[in-house]
Image (tube, grey):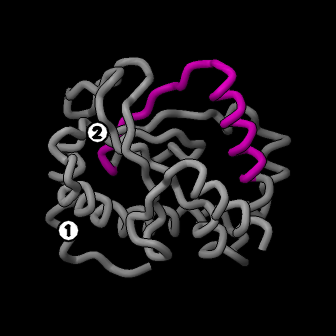
């Protein structure tokens, strides 16, 4: 219950929008990119000042969906399936957005970066500054609370808990996932 209250407050404070509330694992906010130059897998550039769709995983929804599952392999497979189901909806939302022509790409920051390349995303390190140190601490805290073996994982594997930036160009997202948007399944 407390996590649900925190999630609601976080949602309001960050101007996050739902892709499809309760049925899509992603939330987003449209903003100007502030980081270093990114080169996507399809060789497009996302640079400072470009309009991006900042991608957020809806951790509270994932926690509810994963409740009671204690097997890491099963968790990873479910996360993969939910991502595959959610990306076409994200592509459809972006294609229909009034500012779609201005958007250069989709960028997120996560501990869950392994295995995103087959989805079309590129991965890079984040800068070592106070913001990303705080974000890493916050995500590790969430992992320790939400994951069945979270506390153990946080204590034992610092190298496994690197914070990374994941990104994809708008064109690549639409090319890969817009045709599948008509076949979107509900979680």
In the depicted structure, whether residue 54 falls above or below residue 162: below
- Residue drawn at (56%, 19%) of the image: 127
- Front position in the image: 14 or 134: 14
Q: Quadrant of the C terminus?
A: bottom left
Disc 2 crowd, CA 10 A, few/some/many (<14, 14-19, 20+): many
Give me the residue at 23% from left, 43% from top: 170
- The quarter of the picture where the N terminus appears is bottom right
**Residue tagged 1:** 180
Given residues 144 and 130, the one toward you in this image is: 130
Instruction: State the image coordinates of residue 84 (x, y, percent, origin top left).
Output: 36, 64
Q: Are marks 2 and 1 in contact (CB under 8 Å)?
A: no
Is residue 74 in sight in this rendering? no
Q: Circle 2 is placed at which residue position?
A: 105
Question: Which element is circle 1 on?
Answer: helix
Q: Nearer the viewer, mark 2 or mark 1?
A: 2
Considering only order in the chain, which callout, 1 or 2, is on the residue closer to the N terminus?
2
Q: Main secondary structure of the magenta part?
A: helix
SS of the residue under disc 2: strand
Residue 171 rendering spot, x and y as whole percentages: 17, 43
Q: CA distance from mark 2 to mark 1?
A: 19 Å
Q: Quadrant of residue 10?
A: bottom right
Residue 124 forms part of the magenta stretch: yes
Please tell me how crowded label 1 is: few (under 14), some (14-19), or many (20+) other residues with Cα within 10 Å: some
State the extent of the magenta-drawn residues as a range.
119-143
């Amino acid at each position: 219950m407390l996590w649900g209250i925190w999630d609601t407050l976080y949602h309001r404070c960050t101007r996050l929008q739902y892709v499809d509330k309760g049925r899509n694992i992603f939330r987003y906010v449209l903003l100007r990119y502030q980081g270093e130059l990114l080169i996507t897998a399809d060789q497009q550039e996302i640079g400072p000042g470009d309009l991006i769709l900042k991608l957020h995983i809806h951790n509270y929804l994932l926690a509810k969906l994963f409740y009671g599952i204690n097997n890491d392999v099963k968790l990873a497979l479910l996360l993969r399936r939910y991502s595959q189901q959610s990306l076409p909806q994200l592509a459809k939302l972006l294609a229909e957005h009034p500012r779609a022509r201005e958007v250069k790409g989709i960028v997120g920051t996560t501990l869950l970066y392994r295995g995103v390349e087959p989805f079309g995303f590129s991965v890079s390190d984040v800068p070592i500054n106070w913001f990303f140190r705080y974000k890493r601490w916050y995500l590790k805290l969430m992992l320790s609370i939400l994951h069945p073996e979270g506390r153990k994982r946080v204590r034992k594997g610092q190298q496994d808990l690197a914070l990374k930036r994941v990104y994809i160009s708008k064109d690549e997202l639409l090319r890969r996932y817009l045709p599948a948007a008509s076949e979107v399944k509900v979680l």
